[in-house]
Amino acid sequence: MILTVTPNPSLDRTYEVPSLDRGEVVRATGERVDPGGKGVNVSRAVAAAGRRTVAVLPLGGAPGALVADLLDAQGIEVAPVPVAGATRSNIALAEADGVLTKINAPGPELTAAEQELLLETVRQQSRDASWIACCGSLPRGLAPSWYAELVARAHAAGARIALDTSGPALLQALRERPDVVKPNAEELAEAVGRPLTTVGDAVKAAEELRELGARTVLASLGADGQLLVDDAGAWYGSARVTAVRSNVGAGDSSLAGFLIAGGTGPEALASAVAHGAAAVQLPGSVMPSPADLDPAAVTVTTDVPVDRTLKEPVT
C-alpha cells in the first residue's frame, strides 16, 4: 500500500480554452472537476494502476466533502482530518497550444490541534505502507519544519518517505534524510541557489541535495526528461511524446510510477518516465492507466547528456 499525505489539498476545476484573452468572454471547450493536491494526484495515479492507496488530508466545508466523494469514486481510501476552514478551490485554464494558467487559492489555516491530528493520522495509517509520499505546499499555520517532523516520525516508525515539496520546507526536511526527494528543475535551482542551464548542472544540484541529506533524488526536467541520482550513480530517462495536452499532475504521476515500481533503481526511473509522458498527453489532471503507458517509448541510460542545454533553462 502507498500512503499519501497532502497538507493543502484542493478541489480543482480545469477548463480547456482555445486561447486566453484578458478582458474577453472565453468559452471553454471542455471542463473537468477533480480532487487536487500533489499527494492526492499520486494516490489517483496509484489507484489508476490498480494498486491500493490511502490518502491522508485535512478536509473542511463543502469543497472538502466533494474532494472525499471524488476520491472514493476513484477507489481511493480516504483518511480525512477534519478542519474548521474550507478546503481550497483552484482553477486551471489549459490553452490549445499547451500553455497552462493556474489560479491557486491559499487554503485554510490549520490550528495547532489540527496539525498534530494530521501527524497522528499519518502515524496510524502508516503501519501497512510500503511508501509514504508527502507532497505539496504547506497550508497556513504549518511551519517550514513540519515536513521535517513528519519525516522523522515516519522513519521512527520504520517507514520509507518520498518527499515532493520546495523552498524552506524541502531544505529543512533534508536534515532528516528522506529516502526520496522529487524536485522539478525550478525547485532544484531554488534549493541550490543558482541557475541551471544544462543537464549536467541539474546532476550537480541533485548531488548537492544528497550531500544535504537526501538519499535519492528523482528530478523532473520537463521536456528534457528525468534524472535519478542515488548511491549507485546517475541515470537519465526520456520518452517520446506525440503531443502535450496538459502537464497538470505529470510530476505527481511520475512519482507514483517510481514508487509503484519499487522506488529505487533504473527500472523505477523507467516507470516514472512512462507515467509522466502518458500524463502530459491526457486532458486536465487525468492520471494514466496501464493502457495509456508506452514503455517502448522510454529510454533510460547511465550515459547522462551532461552538456545538453535545457530547453527551458532555469535562471
Image (tube, grey):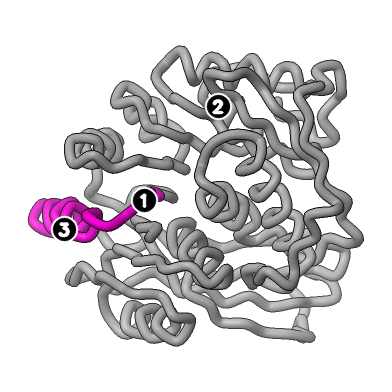
Residue 302 versus residue 40: which sits nearer the camera? 302
Q: Earlier in the sequence, mark 1 or mark 3?
A: 3
Q: Look at mark 2 in the image and give the residue it sits on.
A: 190
Q: What is the residue that sits farthest to the right in this orientation?
A: 242
Residue 69 pos. (x, y %) = 38, 86
Q: Residues within 10 Å of mark 1 (few under 14, many from 20)?
A: some
Residue type (three-letter) at the residue carrying disc 3: Gln
- For image coordinates 35% across by 58% down, the residue present is 3
In the image, is residue 102 above or below residue 259?
below
x 57%, y 77%: residue: 13
The residue sitting at 60% across, 59% down in the picture is: 249
- Mark 1 or 2, closer to the camera: 1
- The vertical placement of 131 against 84, above or below, is above
Residue picked out by circle 3? 124
Which range of residues does the magenta coloring cover?
Answer: 112-133
Instruction: Place residue 270 in its image quadrant.
Output: top right
Left or right: 298 with respect to 248?
A: right
In which quadrant will I find the N terminus?
bottom left
